[in-house]
Amino acid sequence: MTHVTFPFSAIVEQTQLKTALLLCAVDPSLGGVLIRGDKGTAKSTAARALTDILPLIERVAGCAFNCAPGVAYGQCAICSEGNATAEASTVPFITLPLGATEDRVLGTLDLEQALKGAKRAFQPGLLAAAHRGILYIDEVNLLPDHLVDVLLDAAAMGVNSVQREGLSVTHPARFTLIGTMNLEEGDLRPQLLDRFGLMVEVTAPREKTLRAEVVRRRIAFEADPLAYAAVWMSAQDALRTRLATAQRILPGVILDDELLDLISHLCCEFDVASLRADIVMHKAARALAALDGRSRVTPEDVRIAAELALPHRRRRKPFEQPGLDRERLDELMQQASSPPEEGAGEPSAATKNEDGNAAAEDQQQVFAAAPRGSVPRIAVDTHTKRLATGRRSAAADAPRGRVVCAVPHQNPTSLAVGATLRSAALRNPNEFRVTKNDLHQQIRVGKSANLILLVVDASGSMAAQRRMEAVKGAVLALLTDAYQRRDEVAVITFRGESAALLLPPTRSVDLAERGLRELATGGRTPLPHALALALETLEKAGANAGVPPLLVLLSDGKANVALNEDSDPWQESLKLAGLLAERGVPALVLDTETGYLRLGRARHLAQALGAECLSLEELSAENLALTIRGCMNV
């Protein structure tokens, strides 16, 4: 049965999303588009629907590298034949699964040919299949780092180089990268984020008539996909013709030097570091003109290009979301279209500080925290196999990562093809036959993530001393470190009569920051409740995901609410801390107690946890590196 995709023309609203995808179709060198938005906002539907309106391309029948006629890849067996014929074909649309191996993405030794005794042959991977087409990644922010590195290399060079299993192959790999993501699952690495030429924020319609129309169209499509596609066939054909015309006239589209100056001015004003932004804006503005059937770029084209190319490239503070100040863009566009007024280049007296210098425009901080030096770096030295990929701790024998060697293994989970074949050939050169004794296991090294469980004291003993601003500042520093290392984060707060799981384990540290920013303070100190909830949360996380945990407790230790009515809350706290220590959970205690007379209970609690204890003043020291050592039974 023929698979039918939802018609691109039938997508309701989402004008910016459709524009970005059409621009990538007009000029594939733009670098693709990143689509960010909530669940169920037609991100994947729009990406998959694009292929149906793309003009056909010429390719050699049966070619695994998608060679263009007359531009054959040297080692392509099909194209090397003199009788190879070209045919019109749809643009390749290749989906990169999150669980794909490097061999599947890059390509590897053709095992079938090797077992037949033929010379070494290369089996192309997904990058070869995506050449001259679209490489689509759903939930791209969850892509393992070792695959991200592969994509960065291929996207930068336009070729894929494979040096493994005795092979040395380099083949073209020019593709349009389309990624979708939900920010609740965490952000994207800055290096990969910059590789996307354009970025679009997608939200569901807020008007009930539009939402109803979306549902109406989707239900009609699911009832009879072929009949529904036929209804939109004329609109699809018109779009396909429009794209073909735009591709044809694109080389002749002119962008004047004045508009190029405007592009550079906008990039400077929005504090964009990457020069790729200027190039992408130039290409996108020309593609917009071509899409509209014009031969010359207008300022409005530049404006639309800026809205697509700049939001994810401007410099941001930690946890500040990508975006563009539309009012500021309007102001800059207005200034560009109007002659400068006399004296406009000098800052006014109102914008100067006491020294007569221009005041900085943006002094806003997420937390009103005391200034501190470098962000703390927490290194966790453990003795357990890791299941979650990240960038905090080195993990030997990792399920994913760089292959460092191969060892004999009769039941390998990741077959080392080259080592297996070499073993069989050396064992019996006269009769090539692979047996179980020849099998080898790939040994990989990689980086693992951790679950950072923040347990934050929000009781009156903290609030009365106006310490919550300092505590929130410390948590922000720890969250910044977790964000950079792609850790999971969970937050427990305690005040009044109980503790609450403010944020279940997630990779979205932005959600943790938002919750802490609005955190209410005051009341009693139910420390035993918090430690019991921490124990329960860590046990669930270990059982469900296998992510190694790290407990960070911020408190002065002045427990005064017990779990049991007749119990001593302090003794309960020490007992629960001992249970956490028995489970080998690495921990860090940040003592928030201040004043001349101190009880020092946080340090006693740290001893029970087998943890290091630091004061907030110590956490503020520059170049602080924290090493938490432990043996985790996960």
Image (cartoon, helix red, strand yellow):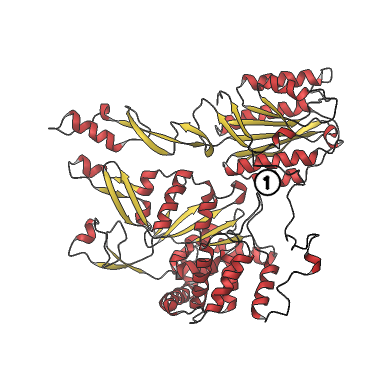
Helix, strand, or loop for circle 1?
Answer: helix
Neighbourhood count class around disc 1 (C-alpha, 10 Å): few under 14, some 14–19, many 20 upward: many
The residue drawn where x is 36% and y is 57% is: 173
The residue drawn where x is 60% and y is 76% is: 300
The vertical placement of 363 against 407, above or below, is: below
The single residue placed furthest to the front in the displayed view is 355
The residue drawn where x is 75% and y is 22% is: 573
Residue 61 percent location from the top left of the image = 27, 62
Which quadrant of the figure has residue 314? bottom right
Image label count: 1
Depth check: give the residue in front, 211 or 495: 495
At label 1, which amino acid type do we have?
Answer: Leu
Residue 244 percent location from the top left of the image = 42, 75
In the rendered view of the protein, which quadrant contains the C terminus? top right
In the rendered view of the protein, which quadrant contains the N terminus? bottom left
The vertical placement of 201 against 535, above or below, is: below
Depth check: give the residue in front, 385 or 315: 315
The vertical placement of 469 against 159, above or below, is: above
Residue 273 percent location from the top left of the image = 57, 59
Depth check: give the residue in front, 262 or 202: 262
The answer to whether residue 221 is seen in the rendering is no
For mark 1, what is the residue? 511
Residue 271 horizontal side relative to residue 466, left or right: left
Residue 166 horizontal side relative to residue 224, left or right: left
